Amino acid sequence: MSPDVVRQVLATAFAIDDGLLGDAVTIRVSGVSDDQNAMLMAGLLLDRLCRVSGRVLVDVRRLHGRPSLASVYFLMRELPLRQHPPREVAILEREALRAHAEFHRTTAANTGVCFTYFFDVAAACAWLAAGR
């Protein structure tokens, strides 16, 4: 298969859409996330983040599966995060995935990027409204 066909197949495993939740832009990610599509998904999500302004809530609660911890580690080092404008991003995750979220947050922080994870919509919205 050509790289374009592979990219198209991987992209059909998930969906990324925008909306509003109060004053914050909400980016909802659904479908399936795994080691094979993690880089593509993260790249598309970064592109989406560059096209919106203001406070952003990324809701990944409908996303099934997650990349392995090893993939998260290498992904955070390979993404061109420093080329994107810094912004406050709240990531809304399921409580059952708290340990995975903490690893992702720590790995991102080690590359100089800060994500703040929340497991409750009200807490995420309050944090965004406070302008932290």
Image (spheres, helix red, strand yellow):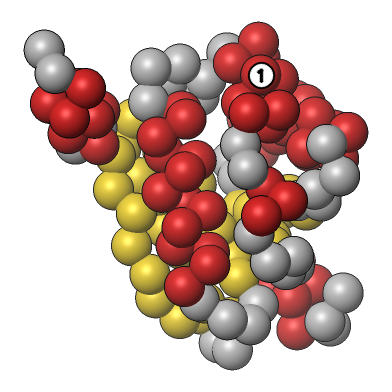
Is residue 36 placed above or below 115 in the rendered structure? above
Residue under the image location 61 percent in, 36 percent down? 79
Q: Is residue 65 visible?
A: no
- Position of the C terminus, as image quadrant, is bottom right
What is the quadrant of residue 11 in the picture? top left
Q: Secondary structure at mark 1?
A: helix
Residue at 45% across / 81% down in the picture?
20
Q: Quadrant of the N terminus?
A: top left
Residue 87 is situated, as x and y percent measured from the top left of the image, at 72, 68
Q: Return the x and y of residue 45 as percentages of the image width and height.
A: 47, 51
Kindly identify which residue carries mark 1. 74
Question: Residue 100: horizontal and vertical position, in percent?
Answer: 69, 25
Amino acid at circle 1: Phe
**Which residue is pictured at 21% across the width and 22% down the height?**
3
71 relative position to 16: left or right: right
Q: Report the front residue among 76 and 67.
A: 76
Q: To which quarter of the image does residue 62 belong?
A: top left
